[in-house]
Image (cartoon, rainbow, N blue to C red):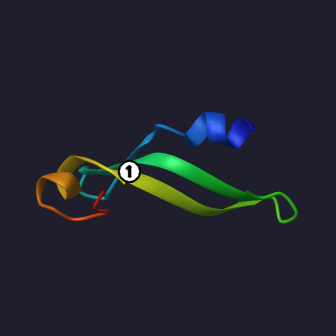
Amino acid sequence: MKINDELLGKEVIDESGDQVGVVKEVDWDANKNKVTSIILKEGGISAKIGLGEKN
């Protein structure tokens, strides 16, 4: 799916310019033609200070 190719692996940056994660998974609703959720792999400042998903 093209949306996955365009989003997977992309950095997610907050308004301060800090990386909060990397796009790990995208859920797409084909009937509504929109993204329903994005799952991030923690990274950047959130990983450094211990926020985010624990693996």
What residue lies at 28% left-to-right and 62% top-to-bottom? Answer: 54
Instruction: Say which quarter of the image contains residue 33.
Output: bottom right
Q: Which is nearer the eye, 17 or 52? A: 52
Instruction: Say which quarter of the image contains residue 11.
Output: top left
Task: Identify the amino acid type marked 1.
Answer: Lys
Furthest residue in direction right, as rendered = 31
Q: Mark 1 sits on what residue?
A: 41
Residue 51: give x, y in percent of width and height: 21, 65
* Element carrying mark 1: strand
Residue 35: give x, y in percent of width and height: 67, 59
What residue lies at 66% left-to-right and 57% top-to-bottom? Answer: 27
For the C terminus, the image quarter is: bottom left
What residue lies at 74% left-to-right and 60% top-to-bottom? Answer: 34
In the image, is 32 to the left or to the right of 40?
right
Residue 24: give x, y in percent of width and height: 48, 47
Furthest residue in direction left, as rendered = 49
For the N terminus, the image quarter is: top right
